[in-house]
Image: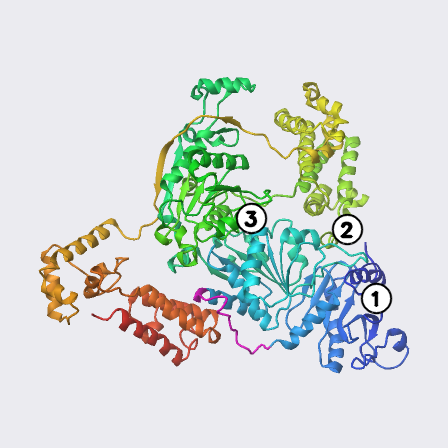
Amino acid sequence: MDLNELRTRKEKIDVYLAEQGWDVMNRASVILEVDTKQSDFLAHSYKTVAETLKNDLESKYVDYLLLDSLGAPLAIVEAKRTSKDPLVGQKQAEQYADDIKQQTGRDVFIFLSNGYEIWFWDRERYPLRLVKGFYAQKDLERLRFQIQKIDPTKPIEVNTRIVDRSKSIENVKRVLEHIHKGHRKGLIVMATGTGKTRVAMAIIDTLLKENRAQKVLFLADRKALRDQAWNKGFLEFFPHEAKDKILHGRYNKEKRLFVSTIQTFQEIYTQKDEHGRYLISPGEFDLIFSDEAHRSIYNRWRDVFTYLDAMQIGLTATPAELVDRDTFRFFQCDDHMPTTLYSYDEAVKDGVLVDFRKSILGAQTHFQIEGLRPSDLTESERNRLIEQGIDPDEIDFEGTELEKKVAIKGTSEAIVREFMEGCQMDQAGTLPAKSIFFAISKKHARRLHEAFDALYPEYKGRLARIIVSDDPRADALIHDFEHESFPRVAISVDMLDTGIDVPEVCNLVFAKPVFSKIKFWQMLGRGTRSDAACKHREWLPDGRKEYFKVFDFWNNFEYWNMNPEGVKNEPTEAITSRVFFLRLKQLERLLAQGDEERATVVRQRLEEDIRSLPMDSVSVREHEREIAKALSPKLWDNVGLDPLEYLKGTIMPLMRFQTGVNLKEASFTVKAERLGLAVLEGNEKEIERLAPEIGEMVDHLPRTLNIVKEKEERLDEVLSRAFWKGLSFEDATGLVADIAPLMQYLSKESHEPIVIDMGDIIEQRTLWTFNEEAPEYVVAFREKVEKRVTELADQNPVIQKILRDEPITEADLHGLEEALAEAGVNVTEEMLQTSPRHPYGSLVAFIRSLFGLYEAPDPKKMIEGAFQTYMIENNKSYSADQLHFIRTIQTVFMRKKHIVMDDLFLAPFTNFGSTAPVPMFDEGDLKAFIGICQGLERELFAEA
């Protein structure tokens, strides 16, 4: 519908302003048709078209002038008719803003709108951008304050109380520099356990201090991540800031820091108060962090981020190569490269994480491999099955169907026994170190728990606990697992896959298959925390964590070795969109068959679906023109487009915004509509497939409820074989009207597998090896050297001098090397440095350490410490790229043990571009770097 400018303003723009608290009838906040040439903006004397139109002085009229709480100019709105592009008013609005600025010396914000689109221009900082609504007065006042207080010349300083690793400081700097350049979106990819929450807090800290942000929202896709940001982020690092958890639409907006879940915001971001005003303005927040963005952005929750017009930073631990390309696009990352990256391999190399690839045990039981056949059943099990009405001769299941269609108690017992016999134990060696079991289902978790209690009763039920989301004690159980000695084993279904942070976890047990690579990495991330992060030494093997052990009972590693990309999980359509699509397919079929009567009925259902869309939702409202077109009779008479394709491409995606949808009812509706389509297509195979699925749902309705009992006769009819013979289209679609509404009462319990009480054994074991620290021959040679030195100790005079700490000459060393050579070993500096116990380049230091007389500092830790200290103390002086350059010096020096000034002008340093190392650094900086290296070289690698 094309509205002229006056109607556009009255019917649309005035309404949208009112939704954000701007009353166009209240001159204290909004004045219409203000003359920007004849008004006195400093004196707040605003003249309108009615006052100046007829005089001869120059006039220019801005459509709306929005005032701050003191009556001063704050923003202007330039309106255009609905058929016009609102951007054609940009220059016009700019002239109005210039007129105001000429008098006040202060810029005003600019909005451009044609009633369908709203564009916002904060022209002192950003280009024009499309927004979902007008900003509220308080939000525009806050933005104006920020503009006044920001000092663009002030260097970026990172709070090293929050982040104390050089890589984390570099990541913080890189994001802040990105924001300083005018970007409003970014993506941080950091492996689980590398401190992405701390990085987020350091970014928040700096932006608060710089006055670039005053209201911050941390959104997570689950409660555990929300609480982690609250407890280990806001409470720890911002103890004096006003903060709150947002659990519903009514919250204290005067506070500065907020945490919530994306699910909560999906419910509240479109809520209005009793006056029709939105509870949350598009400008409510200055900065939003989205934890695990790849799981939320491109589902229905994406609309939350589109509505909230703030700087948006995504956080994810998903490896960069697995992040969805749409996530990169949403966060405006070019070439599928995140704003900053800290990979798992890099973190392992830096010693920040431990490596799971050192110990992976694959194991499978007999029934997992061979499946279960009638001949496997014991006589007692056959009799028990007969008593339950199950024919034992029909027991025929593959191993992949365990815990889905059939469950064998002995299989759970075999898995638990294998774990207990091979897991990493605690410091005392009497209990398992902290461990997580990933189970297939809640019933499976229960069977694993029962196996622990049955096999190891001496622990009195304290060793293992089930932690699932619908347990009201779940948070308390997680707390105990994190902070108490018991339980040692957490058995979970999905809940502990992400979000839990227990550094002491040393065993992970995959008692389920995993077909999503993203999820697989998330689950492995539960064990990657390093020894430095562990507080409870008594829970660790020998009091320290060197690696974590993985038990794989479902050949997951073999699957990922054979299928590196895993199952392609394309984004799925909302279930309401699928219903709409099936009705479109039915309509297409009926039109092709020339069945106008039925086609009219289906078309009416589609129109009912469209009319059910919440038109006051900002996400739906922006498609108002397309919806009006879809409901117009002209659509079906338009030779210029295919109406079915139009509805599929334009309207079907909007169905995800339907409200009050019950998942069980919608799932049944999908099956019924699919059945109707199968009838129209004459697809007997599909009808046969759907019959038991629909029948099972109908059969599981609780007939003890009166509302269900009233339909008992209809339910029996649908369950009868007669109903399915000669099924008509009306029979199929009638299920939607008659029975679908009852599905909300369907029992939560799904079809349970047949439980077999028989034993099982581990039949196959596989030790997966991905890398080795040193070849076996190196280890053997090192042990040989140690043995020969020990044997020579009593008779070799040079070794005696070393043990008495007497001076050693070059001749002494030469003689000792010859003595060792005669004993069958040739000692080299490189060989000595392969020893993790004796990583020294000096033969004297090696011998002293062997006899416990000297413990040399670890060169790697000394080098890391020296460079880390320098970067932390001087982070204010360097950019992210400069910090990366310094970290590269550290890496090269660790490998070469010697660096001179000329080396900085060669590869890999030349990879930083033509500005590296000069003018990226001045001469004083470069000398400081070389000085650090020379000092370390003298201390660590000088000849003893």
Can residue 11 be found in the magenta stretch?
A: no
User: Of marks 2 and 1, which one's residue comes earlier in the chain?
Assistant: 1
| Residue carrying label 2 | 615
Question: Taken as a whole, is the magenta stretch helix, strand or loop?
Answer: loop
Q: Where, quadrant-wise, is the C terminus in this rendering?
A: bottom left
User: Of marks 1 and 3, which one's residue comes earlier in the chain?
Assistant: 1
- Expressed as whole percent of the image width and height from the top left, the position of residue 6 reads 85, 63
| Residue carrying label 3 | 476
- Expressed as whole percent of the image width and height from the top left, the position of residue 21 reads 78, 64
- Expressed as whole percent of the image width and height from the top left, the position of residue 815 reads 10, 65
Q: What crowding class fits label 1: few (fewer than 14 Cα within 10 Å), some (14-19), or many (20 or more)?
A: many
Q: Where, quadrant-wise, is the N terminus in this rendering?
A: bottom right
Q: Is residue 164 placed above or below 671 in the rendered structure?
A: below
**Does residue 136 appear in the picture of this structure?**
yes
Residue at image x 39%, y 30%? Answer: 761
Q: What crowding class fits label 2: few (fewer than 14 Cα within 10 Å), some (14-19), or many (20 or more)?
A: some
Can residue 156 be found in the magenta stretch?
A: yes
| Residue carrying label 1 | 24
Q: Amino acid at mark 3?
A: Ala
Q: Which residues are magenta?
A: 151-167
Q: Marks 1 and 2: in contact by CB < 8 Å? A: no
Residue at image x 39%, y 52%? Answer: 538
SS for callout 2: loop
SS for callout 1: loop
- Distance CA(mark 2)–CA(mark 1): 22 Å
